[in-house]
Image (spheres, rainbow, N blue to C red):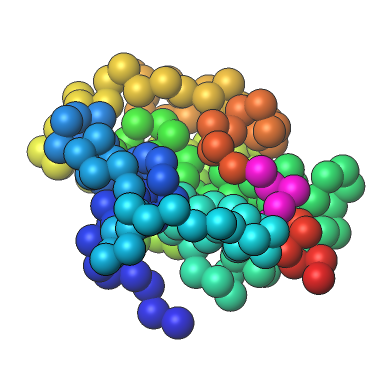
Amino acid sequence: MARYTGPVCRICRREGQKLFLKGERCHTDKCAISRRSYAPGQHGQGRKKVSEYGLQLRAKQKTRKYYGVLEKQFRHYYEMAERKEGKTGEALLSILETRLDNVVYRLGWASSRAEARQLVVHGHFAVNGRRVDIPSYLTKPGEVISIREKSRSSEKIKSIIDINASHPIPKWLDLDKERLEAKVVAIPTREDIDLDVEETLIVELYSK
């Protein structure tokens, strides 16, 4: 299955809420949800009764789109979560949060996860001093993520950091703005994750 390359605003409208897929635009009046809060398509404004399966599917699809993960990889993360102690749904979200592209976004070093993914692929970041260009790399407590020396003079990187200067940093990350590096201090808990989704529905879907 190929990665979705269509208009991402349709995804937010389909889910009925902002997934912040377009960075700064999502915080302005140009946001598609603000202008057209109904689902896209000819029958988008019609009322539909959603089945139990439909609710479960939408919860999974919303989470996938939020983190920009394809179906096969998402299923792999779910299987990883099943093997962990505690609640499977919460473990799944914790795994998704620790992806390198998501960490870069959470630190304010990118305006969206899609932009973070692109910057990671282009080799702008290092983990424990070593260049990592894999967006799906799962960071661990104790690891240090930094912007590489040769990337710090990039006008694009400087502009992104300036734009996101007031970006809220989750408590499981410790950011040093002067040194442009951050440490993963803990595994994110459900309280640290601002995704409005019932992860138990995802578990119910995959448990069938």
Residue at horizontal 48%, vertical 30%?
182
Q: Is residue 182 above or below residue 206?
A: above
Residue at the far right in the pictured view: 85
Q: Residue 64 in the image: state x and y as whole percent.
A: 52, 58
**Residue 161 vs residue 30, the one in the foreground:** 30
- In the current view of this chain or complex, which residue is farthest to the left? 155
Magenta residues (range): 198-202
Quadrant in which residue 137 is drawn: bottom right
Where residue 35 sits: x, y (%)?
A: 20, 39
Question: Which quarter of the rendered picture does the C terminus lie within?
Answer: bottom right
| Residue situated in front as seen by the camera: 51 or 143 | 51
Count of labels shown? Answer: 0
Membership of 156 in magenta stretch: no
The answer to whether residue 35 is left or right of residue 72 is left
**Above or below, 4 relative to 34:** below
Q: Residue at x 58, y 21 (%)?
A: 171
- Residue at 49%, 57% (x, y): give it: 48
Residue 163 visible in the shown view: yes
**Residue 199, magenta (yes or no):** yes
Q: Is residue 104 left or right of residue 208?
A: left
Please give the name of the residue rendered at 27% of the width and 66% of the height, measured from the top-left corner.
42
Please say if 184 is above or below 91.
Answer: above
Quick check: 19 above or below 192?
A: below
Judge left or right: residue 156 versus residue 95: left
The image position of residue 21, as x and y in percent, is: 33, 47
